[in-house]
Image: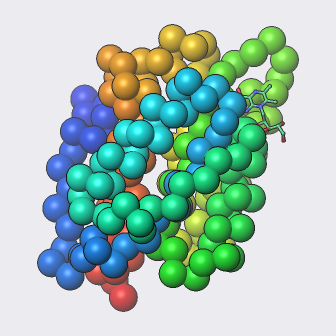
Amino acid sequence: MTDKKKNLSEISFTPHKQFSPQQVRIGVVVSQWNNAITDNLRDGAVNTLLEYGIPKNNIQICSVPGSFELPSATVMMLEADDKMDAVICLGCIIQGETRHFEFIAQAVADGIMKAAIDYATPVIFGVLTCNDMQQAIDRSGGKHGNKGVEAAVSCLQMIDFQRSIC
Ligand code: DLZ
């Protein structure tokens, strides 16, 4: 099934009244592998958080070697700081000649979901899984938008959701 709204960033997000951006703390974990792409995802995510009023000092950015390390780094961040409201994971996995793609992509998706459930905390999957570099370029500030922006909007929506039910 396709959705005409292909970019989540096109969907407007109106937080609940009790949502206070000044009190939100967010971790951003960025994979260094394919950093020409992940740097753009990071910039898109961070700029979006700032636009929504999250203070710069409340955004903790760290980098890991590759996407495979995103789930473990997320858990480390959540363990180190129990005031962290959410973590955004950003990576770019590109299909190669070997089977690394399927192993890494599945492990990262499973690991991010596990961290989110184990910690009852939003952990956002901002990982591109592309057939080639052009697809990654198109989705990191190109013709299909910037998935880092979408990851940041999803993150804020989930923090708002969590606060609205507490
Ligand atoms: C090893 C590897 C390969 C082949 N490809 C990618 C990739 O396309 N995207 C990515 O984020 N990381 C890749 N890596 C690195 C692994 O994620 C991981 O960092 C290493 O296997 C070390 O655990």
Q: Locate the C terminus by quadrant.
A: bottom left
Q: Position of residue 95 (x, y in %)?
A: 69, 19
Q: Residue at x 39, y 49 (%)?
A: 46
55 vs 27, left or right, is left
Q: Residue at x 22, y 39 (%)?
A: 10
Residue extending farthest to the right is: 98
Quadrant of the picture in which ligand 1 is shown: top right
* Residue 13 point in image, percent of width and height: 20, 56
Q: Quadrant of residue 3?
A: top left
Q: Image point 27% across, 41% down: which residue?
A: 9
Q: Residue 108, position in %: x, y? A: 69, 46
Q: Check the image and report above or below for 111 versus 15.
A: above
Q: Residue 64: percent from the left, percent from the top? A: 70, 46
Residue 76 visible within the image: yes
Image height check: is 70 above or below 66?
below
The image's colouring method is rainbow
Residue 17 in which image quadrant: bottom left
Q: Quick check: 66 left or right of 132? A: right
Q: Nearer the viewer, residue 56 or 69?
A: 56
